[in-house]
Amino acid sequence: MPNSTIALSFDALSVWFGYPNTTPAMLARGEYGARVGVPRVLDLLRIHELPATFFIPGHTIDSFPQAVASILEAGHEVAHHSYAHVDPSTQPIDEERRDLERALDALRRIGVQPLGYRSPSADMSPATLGLLETYDFRYDSSLMADDFRPYRPRIGDRVSQQEPLIPGRLARLWELPMAFELDDWVHFQFNFNPYRNGTSAPSKVLEIWAAELDWMHTNVDGGILTVTMHPQVIGRGHRIAMLTQFIAHCRQYHDLTFARLGDVVAQLGPPDAAAATPA
């Protein structure tokens, strides 16, 4: 049975600290996610009785506790998204470990032992997957070596411009792949400096997301489509309307279910028992 998973990154303010010059106007856009976006998204999920996974940085947990509490009270999964939305590919391993632990502490303060992780900016250092194993994560959702099939990512690949790939070992966790084409930030988030257009028509994005779902449903047994959204982006009225249309499109398939990523992993079982993994 195919699944559609709604995964939201509730970055709030923290995402804007990655820009060279973080301004009050940028931070206001992050606050919009907590003030307006989260309530609108939660209302939509409640109306349609849909479960979702929220990847939340520790900085957001500490800055907007009421918004985070409302997500938990609604029964959604909360997963790890770093502490302050720092790209781990830029961090030395000790700094990456400290950030991972600080975010874990923030999650534990609200009673969450996360099953899953999504990297800020969907990137990793060579140490990231090994750290996730060390801290007993069950899944990651940052990589793109497949589109609709969960797989086990590899640790310790050896490859360079001059040397072909020598595959490393399989990680002891699942990868639930994401895609930038299925990420609202890529399509909708405008910025002046560095410039990002971000003015896609919702009809264009709906066409892409619906076509991906249709292709998966026809061609992939047991496929999973993970749509990534941010409350400060998808929360605008015309985009909530688009998301409502996408949900209706999904529901025309009576054998399709919506699921939290953690529930998908529970259905998959232990990764060591998996027989098929992309080479």
Image: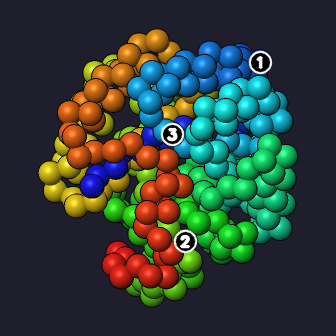
Q: Residue at x 68, y 23 (%)?
A: 34
Label whose residue precedes the other's in the sequence (3 or 2): 3
**What secondary structure is found at the residue carrying circle 3?**
loop
Between the residue at mark 3 and the residue at mark 1, the CA separation in whole angstroms equals 30 Å
Q: Is residue 173 left or right of residue 21?
A: left
Q: Between residues 168 and 42, which one lies in front from this camera angle?
A: 42
Q: Residue at x 60, y 57 (%)?
A: 116
Q: Residue furthest top?
A: 237
Circle 1 residues within 10 Å: few <14, some 14–19, many ≥20: few
Q: Which residue corresponds to mark 2?
A: 173
In this figure, what is the number of numbered marks? 3
Which x, y percent locates residue 153?
48, 72
Circle 3 residues within 10 Å: few <14, some 14–19, many ≥20: many
Q: Is residue 16 left or right of residue 8?
A: right
Label whose residue precedes the other's in the sequence (3 or 1): 1
As shown in the figure, which amino acid type bears the numbered disc 1? Pro
Q: Which residue corresponds to mark 3?
A: 52
Q: Which residue corresponds to mark 1?
A: 24
The label nearer to you, 3 versus 2, is 3
The relative height of residue 98 versus residue 50 in the rendered view (above or below) is below
* Quadrant of the image occupied by residue 55: top right
As shown in the figure, which amino acid type bears the numbered disc 2? Leu
